[in-house]
Image: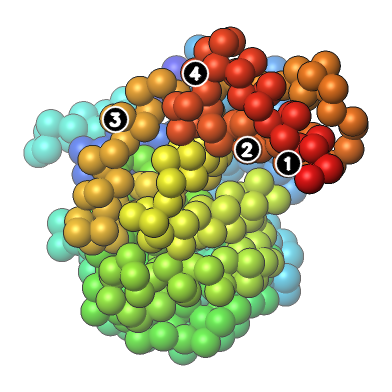
Amino acid sequence: MRIIQILRDAGHTAYFAGGCVRDQLLGIQPLDYDIATDAQPKTVQKLFPRCQMVGAAFGVALVRLGGHAIEVATFRREEGYSDRRRPDRVVFTNAREDAQRRDFTVNGLFADPLTIDPETNHDRVIDYVGGIDDLNNQCLRAIGEPDERFGEDYLRMLRAVRFTARLDFHLEPRTAASVRSLAKYLGQISRERIGSEVLAMLAHPRRAHAVTLLEELRLDGPVLNEDHLEPAQTTAPLNNLPHNPQPPVTLAAWWLTRQRIPMQLDAIAPLCERHADDVADRWRKALCLSNTLETTLRATLKLVPRAAQWGNLRIAQRKRLLAEKAWPHTWTLLNAIDDTAATQPIADDLPTLTAQGVAPEPLVRGEDILEAGMRPGPEVGKLLEIAYDEQLEGRIHDHATAQAWIQAHVSTAQDPA
Ligand SMILES: Nc1ccn([C@@H]2O[C@H](COP(=O)(O)OP(=O)(O)OP(=O)(O)O)[C@@H](O)[C@H]2O)c(=O)n1
């Protein structure tokens, strides 16, 4: 508001613009605030000498004030989108035209925080695009001609899905039809932008709605570089995830719903076994995932078949499974598939297995075995593994039992018989 006041005192028009107005009207705390003004970029620079021009050509300045970084953009019209992302030319103009270049009506609103609207007793809202009606009707609608809005930036098709799902809106039929007809062009935009939109929609609690929309609008194929699938009957794993799930889990849950199999551990495990490598590799490319995310996704899926074998695992094997870095992700995923018959035995064992830690410091170390007289070589490693299993099983539990075990096993191992 101070930034707006400074611009206003200098004789300019300045409003909050876009997403922050939408969120405020919906009673959602905005994540960030953008300001739009008729002040030319040079004037903004003069009024805020320490601002940073982040998109000088587009007239955008980053103003830091009171610990916040706020984007102040000059009202603009955009012309030509030869790269389908950025305009070829920007013409500084007025608020009305600035609203019309935006993607969706609910994103095309301005608010004047320095004037209270007597009717609503809130900040005056300036609406050139019918955004307030659409907000009230929970409708996401492209501004003007949907084909043109999406043609300017195909990423807007994914934004349509993200906002519709996140706000629990419906997608206006002409806007939806346009997405469906243009979905095949999504591949023209960068995989990085696609990936970050998809991860953002999967991070939100309404992720199942987003995934269903992606499939209904035939965006799933171009997003994942896979064949299109009709929406799944059950999106259970996506719905059942806890608050703030990690990206490897949301991705794995989406992949599971795309397998179109019963959400039972026995059915899922062989698919995870067979496809973990392949899906991690393909989705890394399609969504431009980081190496860490790819590795964790793969590891999360690979632990599923091991968990499915729980009943046949010895205590040491169970502890080793629980000590795997990706186990917390796998466990979250398993709980989300909601196959209690399969997961309850694991849940029942967890308190006992984790009581003394699943990855204790080894009580038998390499030097202990060498000191006991064994020759260096691969056999030492094998023996250490066995000793660690014995420790996990509780048969080696202190210095004395470790020493006794070494004496018994080193002499046996060296015995030519
Ligand atoms: N491809 C895009 C990206 C953004 N915008 C406009 O720029 C504003 C700010 O964009 P952004 O910060 O990406 O989105 P928000 O609407 O603020 O939503 P979020 O909550 O995701 O930040 C949007 O409201 C919209 O008016 C647009 O028209 N087309």
* Numbered disc 3: secondary structure: helix
* Label at residue 351: 3
Which residue position is annotated with label 2? 386
What kind of residue is marked 4? Answer: His
- Identify the amino acid type marked 3: Pro
Say above or below: 212 vs 396: below
Report how far apart the C-alphas of labels 2 and 3 lie in the structure: 24 Å
Of mark 4 and mark 3, the one earlier in the sequence is: 3
Looking at the image, tell me whether mark 2 or mark 4 is earlier in sequence order.
Answer: 2
Closest to the observer, 121 or 398: 398
Q: Position of residue 181 (x, y in %)?
A: 46, 89
Amino acid tagged 1? Lys
Label 3 vs label 1: CA separation? 29 Å
Q: Look at the image and name its color scheme.
A: rainbow
The image position of residue 178, as x and y in percent, is 42, 83
Secondary element type, mark 4: loop
Q: With respect to residue 313, does 42 lie above or below? A: above
> Alpha carbon of mark 4 to alpha carbon of mark 3: how far?
19 Å
Please identify, in this view, whether the residue under mark 2 or under mark 3 is nearer the observer.
2
Residue 312 can be seen, yes or no: yes
Q: Secondary structure at mark 1?
A: helix
Residue occupying the point 57% across, 66% down? 276
Residue position marked by numbered label 1 in the rendering? 382
Foreground mark, 4 or 3, reads 4
Q: Is mark 3 within 8 Å of ligand 1?
A: no
Q: Quadrant of the C terminus?
A: top right
